Amino acid sequence: MSVSKLRPLALALIAVTSFTMAGCAGSRAKKDTSYVARDVNSLYATAKERLDRGDFKLAAALFDEVERQHPYSVWARRAQLMSAFSYYMSRDYTESTGSAQRFLSIHPGNRDAPYAYYLIALNYYEQIEDVTRDQKITQQALDSFGELIRRYPTSRYAADARLKVDLVQDHLAGKEMEIGRFYQQRGNWLASVVRFRKVIDSYDTTSHTPEALMRLTESYLALGIPEEAKKAAAVLGHNYPGSKWYERAFSLVQKHVPQA
């Protein structure tokens, strides 16, 4: 999935979690991040400067340094989340997730906790792969967005999370369809029924439901269960009467099921 589709919303973090610090003219960031004791104001300002320049990896390392050198300052908490954001922008999703999870473990009730949950979900979402691949990360994205919605249903991030849940569910349904069609091609009709029923039972609001009902009709006919085939076709006709999938299912039933 394209990172560019997500970046505009993710960039809102800068407005939410960063602000001007008095007297933070600070020196320029050094190329390396070896330990050099610096006051928290200049260190944080240097990290923010690198972030603004788009030098995300170095910005993340410098925000980590704020937390390391000044662990008990108010800036340490803010730097944790800025570090997670910087890692996200650099596409280092594992480090970003780790930073966000660490923030939540230390500051579970913080006002920025909804964003931390959102960022964790985005990290998984960005790694979703084609339906031909394993979908473990897709499920993690779904679970993470669900956790955000459950905990903070009215937060500014919940609405976008709900939209992405729909996309993720459609993707998972697509995986079930791919496996179901694979079983059909090999004549393993019972296994195909299990997959198509999963789409209908768990992902019934996705774009794959009409085809799943038609494929069920095919599989039930191949298994010699015409009544079940008629039921699947009837549900398809009731909910998607004008679809090409209903036309195919209706034709199959007319051809292979004796009419009363």
Image (cartoon, grey):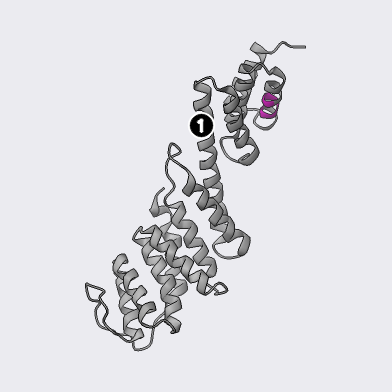
Percent across and percent down for residue 189 are 58, 22
Residue 253, quarter of picture: top right
Is residue 16 highlighted in magenta? no
- Amino acid type for the residue under numbered disc 1: Ile
Residue in the foreground of this view, choosing between 78 and 102 = 102
Residue 83, quarter of picture: bottom left
Q: Is residue 253 above or below residue 53?
A: above
Q: Residue at x 56, y 37 (%)?
A: 207
The residue identified by callout 1 is 179
Percent across and percent down for residue 142 are 54, 51
Classify mark 1: helix, strand or loop. Answer: helix
Percent across and percent down for residue 6 are 43, 56
Q: Describe residue 168's horizontal placement relative to residue 57 as left or right.
A: right
Q: Describe residue 49's horizontal placement relative to residue 130 as left or right.
A: left
- Main SS, magenta region, reads helix
Q: Residue at x 39, y 50 (%)?
A: 2
Residues drawn in magenta: 232-236
Residue 54, quarter of picture: bottom left
Q: Residue at x 34, y 69 (%)?
A: 60
